[in-house]
């Protein structure tokens, strides 16, 4: 008996369940199947290997972090608009950036760009505490409420200028920036603990995902992949 490859079977399941969702079906079972397909095809099928990241991405209900009229597309391999000229990142990019931080569970993490709160939820499952800053008041308020209702007691959201960081809670073991500044703000490097890691999509027309590691001798930089993010907004913009 000839067996079909596992990846092929997963792809068929993804197409089938996605079709149901487009036709109006939106049961939790269908979303569950879409989420598992997302993990198998988009994450494991590429270079996401961290067991913790894969497990969390298979659990966190991404569809609850997108507008209701976009939920049938919540597990697609692309970003989605969430209003106010902002987006929720492609699932693969969320997983890639989270994996790059190499979280062990004890960390205090600063996120710049809360958006709808999805990245914060993923981080909250993998570290001790998340502090998240969102410059758009409406998004900050709705994300904070959403995360609270979902039981994420280790996430604190505030509306503010991400360029300034969150000095009150510094230093941070890890910092993740989910919008693109022309260059990484020195203020955020200063708020990173020695040994800490910062990941950022850096640049304007062409953006590159970069991982900075702070040591007692300075800061090292690793260039990762080319990406496309919305610009990081300064408070004076």
Image (spheres, rainbow, N blue to C red):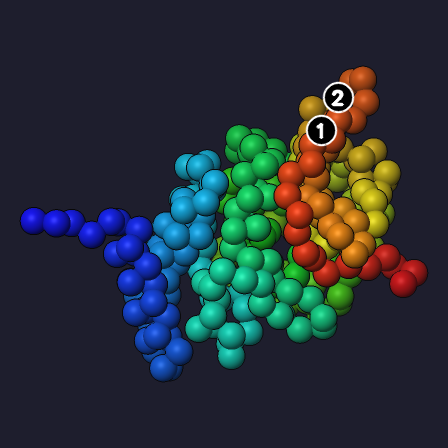
The residue at 79%/56% (across/down) is 205
The residue at 7%/49% (across/down) is 1
The residue positioned farthest toward the bottom in the image shown: 23
Q: Which type of secondary structure does the marked residue at label 2 adopt?
A: strand
Q: Position of residue 230 (x, y in %)?
A: 72, 61
Q: In the picture provided, is 222 more to the left or to the right than 98?
A: right
How far is the residue under mark 2 from the one under mark 1?
6 Å
- Image location of residue 108, percent across then percent down: 64, 37
36 relative to 148 in the view: left or right: left
User: Where is mark 2, residue-wise?
Assistant: 215
Q: Residue at x 69, y 32 (%)?
A: 222
At which x and y percent is residue 120? 59, 51
174 with respect to 146 (left or right): right
Q: Residue furthest right?
A: 236
Q: Quadrant of residue 204?
A: bottom right
Q: Which of the 4 quarters of the picture holds residue 123?
A: top right
Instruction: Identify the residue at horizontal 81%, vertical 42% (top origin).
Output: 184
As drawn, which residue projects farthest toward the top? 217
Front residue of 192 and 40: 40
Q: Is residue 56 visible?
A: no
Foreground residue among 146 and 163: 163
Give the left or right position of residue 143, taking residue 29 as reference: right
**Pointer 1: what residue?**
213
| Quarter holding residue 109 | top right
Q: Secondary structure at mark 1?
A: strand
């Amino acid at each position: 008996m000839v067996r079909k490859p596992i990846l092929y079977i997963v792809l068929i399941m993804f197409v089938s369940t996605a079709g149901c969702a487009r036709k109006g079906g939106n049961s939790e079972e269908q979303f569950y199947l879409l989420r598992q397909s997302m993990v198998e095809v988009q994450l494991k099928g590429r270079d996401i290997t961290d067991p913790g990241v894969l497990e969390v991405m298979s659990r966190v209900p991404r569809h609850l972090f997108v507008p209701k009229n976009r939920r049938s597309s919540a597990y697609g391999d692309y970003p989605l608009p969430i209003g106010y000229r902002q987006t929720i990142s492609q699932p693969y990019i969320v997983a890639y950036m989270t994996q790059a931080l190499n979280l062990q569970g004890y960390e205090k993490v600063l996120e710049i760009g809360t958006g709808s709160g999805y990245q914060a939820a993923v981080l909250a499952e993998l570290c001790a505490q998340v502090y998240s800053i969102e410059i758009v008041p409406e998004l900050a308020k709705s994300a904070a409420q959403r995360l609270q209702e979902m039981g994420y007691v280790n996430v604190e959201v505030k509306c503010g200028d991400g360029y300034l960081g969150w000095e009150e809670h510094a230093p941070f073991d890890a910092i993740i920036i989910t919008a693109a500044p022309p260059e990484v703000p020195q203020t955020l490097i200063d708020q990173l603990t020695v040994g800490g890691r910062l990941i950022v999509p850096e640049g304007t027309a062409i953006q590159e995902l970069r991982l900075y590691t702070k040591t007692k001798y300075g800061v090292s930089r690793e260039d990762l992949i080319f990406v496309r993010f919305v610009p990081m907004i300064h408070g004076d913009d």
